Each structure stands twice: as C-alpha cells, then as structure tokens.
Amino acid sequence: MDTQQAVAETAPFEATEDGVEARRDGSNKITLGPGDSLEGKLNYNGHVSVQGRAEGEFRISGNFDVANGATVKALIEGSNVSIKGDVEGMLTAREKLTIGKSGKINGDITVKRLQIEDGASLNGHVRMGSFENG
Amino acid sequence: MAESETSMVMLGPNDRLIGELHIEGNLRVSGTLEGQIEATGDVEVAEAAKVKASVTGREVNVSGQVNGPVVASKKLVIGRSGSVVGDVKVPRLVMQDGASLSGNVQMGPKVAAEMAASAETAPEMAAVGATDGQTDEKPKGKRR
C-alpha cells in the first residue's frame, strides 16, 4: 500500500494527462481512444496511436500505431508503423512495418523493413528497400 | 526419412537443377534451381539456395533467395535471411524481421477458399494417375 502511494505521488501527471502528452525524449504523442475518430489531413511531428477510427492522410515523423479493433482508411506515412487493426490505403514506413497477428492491410506498402506475424493479412503490392529514389 | 508415405527430395549446396520439378512430397533446396517447382508437401529453401522459379507447395519456408511467384496452400514463411522477389499468393504469411519481399501479395480467407476449391479437383487427377501404376498409398483418413 505504501508503494502504491509513492507511485501516485511521484507520477501525478502521466496517468491523468489524456490525449496529448509530452514524453521524456521531447517528442509528442497523439492517442485516439477507442471511441475517438479523426477525419482529415494530419502532418505531425511525433507519434500517433489510433485505437478508434481514422480517415484521411497522415504524415507522421515518428511512429504510427494502429491498435487491435481500430479502423484506418488513409494514406499513412510514418517512421515505424505497427498495425494490429484494420487498415485500408497506401502505407509507407521509413523504417519498419510490423503487422501483428490481428492486423489487416488492404493497400500497397512501401517499407524499409517488414515483419509479419502469423495470422496477419495483407493484400497489395509490397516494395522494400531504401527511400532514396522516392 | 521421417515418414514412409511422403518422399523427400534434397538438393545440396552444390547441386543444380534447371527445368521442371514435380514431386509428391517435400523438397529441400540448398543449391541452385531454375524453372518450375511443384510439391504436394512442404518446400524449404535454405539459406545458401538460389531459386529462380515459380514455387508451389503446401508450406513454403524461405531462408535463401527466391526469384519468382510463390503459391503456398497453407503458409509461407520468409526467414530473416530470406528474400522473395515475385508475386505471393498464400492464405497465411509470416515474415521475420530482416526478411525481404517485393511483389504483389494476395492472402486471407478468400485465397484459402480458392485453394480449397482447386484442391478438390486435384485428388481426382491423382486418382487417375494412380490407376496406371500400383500404389501402396492408403487413404489417410482411416489411419490412427
């Protein structure tokens, strides 16, 4: 019980800060909760995590996460991209794309590195390699 | 040999095959292969292997280089040293980090259903072929 209190005192903001939170490395993060939805175009310097619904165009400097149960219909560009939900659209991962076992992608992907877990689904064209030639 | 009913074909690191290969059983390639491969069982492409062929099998495991379309009726696994350049049609696909893949990927339940449909016609053809020669193959369903 003592430790619980200590934790609560030393980290008063981290748990309560909803949505946008500043991280220790200075990069920002947007989290769309399960009931949240976003439609439009987003250019963002930081990480994005989607648990709800997102539609449009996302160009992210950091990592892009699509959680299990999330639906994304968009053009996605991110550094490390992790897909555990449903994704429809063109996807670019400048570093690595991970498709989890619950992940589903319908669309063409361009990635540097690719990891696919058993159970994942992918329909589309795969292009791998460096990004020097666009 | 693990099982008596299925044959196992192995191509060593210094072996080379150019042409068409059709086997009722499993295949393991460590050398060079060009042309067309069709196996009823599993296909394994080892790390040093260079395959420039269309590959068809049940479970296909790639740790080497494959240049050509790959069709697996069960699953395709591309290991961390593996590379596939070509279109892929499989119900399930596993790719380890470090693996490389370039091509069109078609997978999921739709592909699985398609495979099942084509598998239904395959045993008939096999049965016709079996009447030509004597085969000791027993129906697998009755085995314990």
Image (spheres, helix red, strand yellow):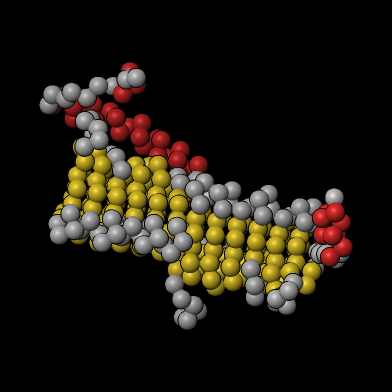
Identify the residue shown where x is 19% and y is 44%. Answer: B9
* Number of marks in the rendered image: 0
| Residue B62, x across and y down, in percent | 34, 55
Taking the view exactly as shown, the residue that stands out farthest to the front is: A2
Q: Is residue A114 above or below residue B94?
A: below
Identify the residue shown where x is 28% and y is 21%. Answer: B139
Q: In screen coordinates, is A25 left or right of A118? A: right
Q: Is residue B73 above or below residue A63?
A: above
Q: Nearer the viewer, residue B70 or B122?
A: B70
| Residue B130, x across and y down, in percent | 18, 27
Q: Is residue A18 visible?
A: no
Q: In screen coordinates, is A109 left or right of A7? A: left
Q: Nearer the viewer, residue B69 or B75?
A: B75
Q: In screen coordinates, is B140 left or right of A45? A: left
Q: Nearer the viewer, residue A2 or B90?
A: A2
**Could you say which quadrant of the image residue B68 lies in?**
bottom left
Identify the residue shown where x is 23% and y is 53%. Answer: B29
| Residue B85, x across and y down, in percent | 35, 63
Q: Is residue A50 above or below residue A42?
A: above
Quadrant of the snapshot with the C terminus of chain B: top left
Quadrant of the snapshot with the N terminus of chain B: top left
